[in-house]
Image: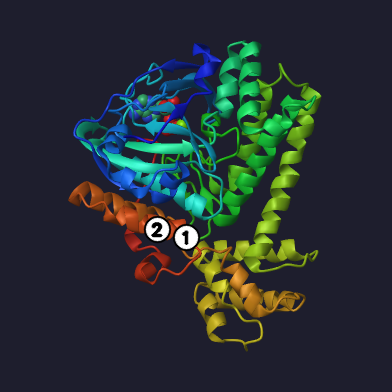
Amino acid sequence: MNRLIFDNSFSQLGEHFFTRVQPSGLPNPSLTNVNPEAAKLLGLEPPDLLQDWFLQWCSGNQRMPGSDPLAMVYSGHQFGGYSPQLGDGRGLLLGEIKGPEGKWDIHLKGAGKTPYSRFGDGRAVLRSTIREYLCSEAMHGLGIPSTRALSITTSDEPVYRETQETATMLIRLSRSHVRFGSFEYFHHHNEPNAVKRLADHVLEQHLPELIDKENRYLEMFRHTVHSTAKLIAQWQAIGFAHGVMNTDNMSIIGETMDYGPFGFLDAYNPGYICNHSDTSGRYAFSRQPVIGLWNCNALANALTSLISVEQLTGVLEEYEPLLLSTLLKLQRCKLGLEQQQSDDETLIEDLLDSLAQNQVDYTIFFRRLCYFDENAPDQSTSHVELRDLFLDRTACDDWIARYRQRLALEQRSPVDRQETMRQTNPKYVLRNYMAEIAIRKAEDKNDYREIDRILLLVQSPFDEHPECEEYAKHPPAWSQQLSVSCSS
Ligand code: AMP
Ligand code: MG
């Protein structure tokens, strides 16, 4: 007996917005990983996850009552150029499930060919599936809005990339799969009625509190712009690079989505380009805030049939100040500063410059800073552990002296501050090499346990995990050779 009953608000929009497609199920599927946290969101109990119907569903072989699988159509700006025809080329929206905390879109990634597959085979490979499974949960664990991941299902179906790989499926959960590119598609096809229908859908499903407002479309746009600005501020504060910020990968509700060649910073490097295919560095780490605005501008353009240009421009002007003020707030938290002082920004900028010049590991620096005791003498353990990270030790000493003075203006006790800082500065982030270890074990040895181990770690990245201490250290030398690109 299965427990998943589907509803389909998106399919009620009509076939203009999608193409109905049945999943091409995986032969001889094997459910290698299930995320209990995501299962709970759907109201599933642990015994359900062991049932054959669950495996058959996760592998696209069994349809659930009410499910109406479809490939959504969209377009988008990819690396700055407009691609008029994109869409779900290797994933399907199966419908919606109402869980204890509300409704979730359920997306089956790797479900086979659709009319939008272009030259692709509609499949996802194991390595990219593992990366998305782990990273979406890592982002959620860090408190950053993200799609979620329920399961990884492998098979013995070969797929061909540079080498032969294994066809794999991921079940993804999101509050909405509508993208900036969904609006762009209808705008650029000169279909203002469809733009309006889609906006009404987003309002009804995700922003019901705005429906009765006279300027509801403007408020919807404002919501997207604001949530995008806040999202990207969070990426910058944690040191996350998305890698492919095309408008078809931008969520209308401001979640991180479509994980490909993402990367977390190791040594602090504003110019970090995580995507090997991004030869011009369009999506370099430090460019993410400005690209976010560029993308909001593309969305604004797609909404000109609903909202005046003056109003759209007015909202776009709110993006930069909101992003900067959110980022500053997050950076103050990282430093444990509750008070606001006028030269805090200089203190932060000088620190980041110094981290870059000294190639200091971003995550390790801030985690060690959580143990700094301003009342301990110079060269105490907490100080030495910080200065050991710098090539130029006096650069560290100089900054620490300023930080010590700044902390003197705070009211909070050092113990309270340190405790709060440890809830802001993670001990663990999903560095590329960690995902790579899990991938190699899975691909070479059929061993999927490392995925579960890392999942637990990244789901509570602020906590201590003594059994995984290795993953809190500097990345190994071989990780420098890793390169990830869009090929998946
Ligand atoms: P992405 O870079 O993963 O966001 O994908 C960009 C576009 O290419 C989307 O429309 C995808 O659905 C499509 N796509 C990516 N990989 C495949 C594949 N293996 N088969 C079919 N379509 C794909
Ligand atoms: Mg995409």
Give the residue type at disc 2: Leu
Q: Secondary structure at mark 2?
A: helix
- Where does the image place residue 391, in percent across and percent down from the top left? 51, 72
**In the image, what residue occupies the spot 56% across and 87% down?**
380
Task: Characterize the local packing of mark 2: few (<14), some (14-19) or many (20 or more) Cα atoms within 10 angstroms.
Answer: some
Residue 352 vs residue 249, the one in the foreground: 249
- Where residue 130 sits, quadrant-wise, is top left
Q: Quadrant of the N terminus?
A: top left
Q: Residue furthest bottom?
A: 377
Contact? badges 1 and 2 (CB < 8 Å):
yes
Q: Nearer the viewer, residue 65 or 431?
A: 65
Give the quadrant of residue 232. top right
Disc 1 marks a residue whose amino acid type is: Ser
Vertical comparison of 115 with 379: above or below: above
**Quadrant of res 183:** top right
The residue drawn where x is 70% and y is 30% is 220
Residue placed at 33% from the left, 21% from the top? 113
**How far apart are the two marked residues, 1 and 2, measured between alpha carbons?**
7 Å
Residue 356 visible in the displayed image: yes
Q: Position of residue 328 (x, y in %)?
A: 70, 56
Q: Which residue is mark 1?
A: 460
Q: Is residue 457 above or below residue 156?
A: below
Judge the density around disc 1: few (<14), some (14-19), many (≥20) Cα neighbours within 10 Å. many
Find numbered disc 1 in the image and state the secondary structure of the residue it sits on: loop
User: Whole-percent x and y of residue 341?
Assistant: 79, 66
Name the residue that disc number 2 marks.
Answer: 456
Colour theme: rainbow
x and y, in percent, of residue 390 in the image: 52, 72
* Residue 361 in view here: no
